[in-house]
Image (cartoon, helix red, strand yellow):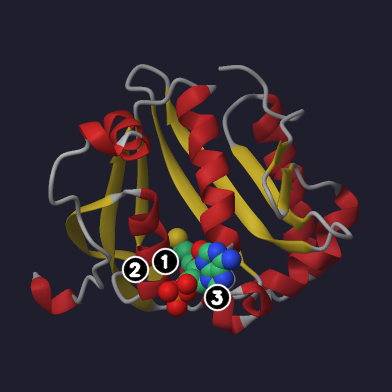
């Protein structure tokens, strides 16, 4: 796998780039907010050093080609809005996981839709991925909708897969194939009845 530390993606309103040490305070503000961390895989961050360590760890992972971790910045003024990552790459199966989070004040404006489209496009077009997976809390409706907007399908539910700060939670497993992505870009070849926005109620299982 190649190194990722020079990757820089731009969209209509956003710039996606690796975080640097100087971004730690802004990253800490985002991930020390309990509203963001309600369904996250770690407890709320309580020290700036967690942000500094995360940036340093991601920089090492980016150099090694093990993680593609990008900050999402507003193109005007470079304000940090959130992060999106591809990680857990499997070279043989051309597969990776995706994760993402936005500052509370940036919700409801389509920023993640724009960022995920760029990251996923990069994964399929430049990294030759065949499949991207996401593991989310089934109660996280906003996250499910973010995935469904990109064409992901919900493929299963793993019970009590996480224990975060003593709370057990299930995982709704989502997948997006290269063939789904290509078909969505070319609606003429897409299967009829592609999945509509659906709010994954846990009771459906
Ligand atoms: C998951 C998360 C990123 C979704 O954020 P979001 O703001 O709902 O998603 P988007 O940025 O794509 O915005 C989509 C919303 O903006 C609206 N919107 C407003 N202006 C828009 C525009 N110009 N373009 C597109 N959508 C726009 C859309 O209608 C949609 O609203 P709706 O959900 O009410 O229909 C956010 O809830 C979050 O960060 N949660 C905490 C972290 C988390 O749980 N991450 C996932 C764990 S794996």
Gap between marks 2 and 3 measured at Cα = 19 Å
Tell me which residue sits at (65%, 73%) in the image. Answer: 106
Q: Is residue 87 left or right of residue 76?
A: left
- Residue at which label 1 appears: 143
Q: Nearer the viewer, residue 134 or 46?
A: 134
- Vertical position of residue 140 compared to residue 66: above or below: below
Give the image location of residue 187, x and y in percent: 28, 39
- Locate the C terminus by quadrant: bottom left
Give the image location of residue 177, x and y in percent: 30, 34
- Vertical position of residue 151 compared to residue 178: above or below: below
Outermost residue, front side: 188
Indicate if the residue with disc 3 has its beta carbon within 8 Å of ligand 1: yes
Gap between marks 1 and 2 measured at Cα = 8 Å
Q: Is residue 176 left or right of residue 88?
A: left
- Residue at which label 2 appears: 137
Indicate if the residue with disc 1 has its beta carbon within 8 Å of ligand 1: yes
Tell me which residue sits at (77%, 61%) in the image. Answer: 80
**Mark seen at residue 108:** 3
């Amino acid at each position: 796998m190649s190194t990722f530390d020079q990757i820089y993606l731009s969209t209509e309103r956003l710039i996606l780039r690796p975080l640097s040490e100087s971004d730690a305070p802004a990253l800490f503000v985002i991930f020390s907010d309990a509203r963001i961390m309600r369904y996250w895989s770690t407890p709320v961050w309580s020290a700036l050093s967690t942000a500094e360590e995360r940036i340093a760890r991601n920089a090492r992972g980016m150099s090694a080609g093990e993680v593609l971790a990008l900050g999402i910045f507003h193109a005007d003024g470079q304000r940090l809005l959130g992060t999106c990552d591809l990680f857990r790459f499997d070279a043989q199966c051309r597969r990776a996981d995706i994760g993402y989070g936005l500052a509370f004040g940036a919700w409801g404006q389509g920023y993640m839709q724009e960022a995920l489209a760029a990251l996923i496009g990069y994964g399929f077009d430049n990294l030759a991925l065949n499949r991207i997976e996401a593991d989310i809390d089934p109660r996280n409706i906003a996250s499910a909708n973010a995935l469904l907007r990109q064409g992901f399908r919900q493929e299963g539910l793993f019970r009590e897969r996480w224990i975060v700060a003593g709370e057990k939670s299930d995982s709704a497993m989502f997948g997006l194939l290269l063939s789904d992505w290509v078909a969505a870009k070319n609606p003429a070849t897409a299967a009829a009845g592609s999945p509509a926005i659906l709010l994954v109620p846990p009771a459906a299982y």
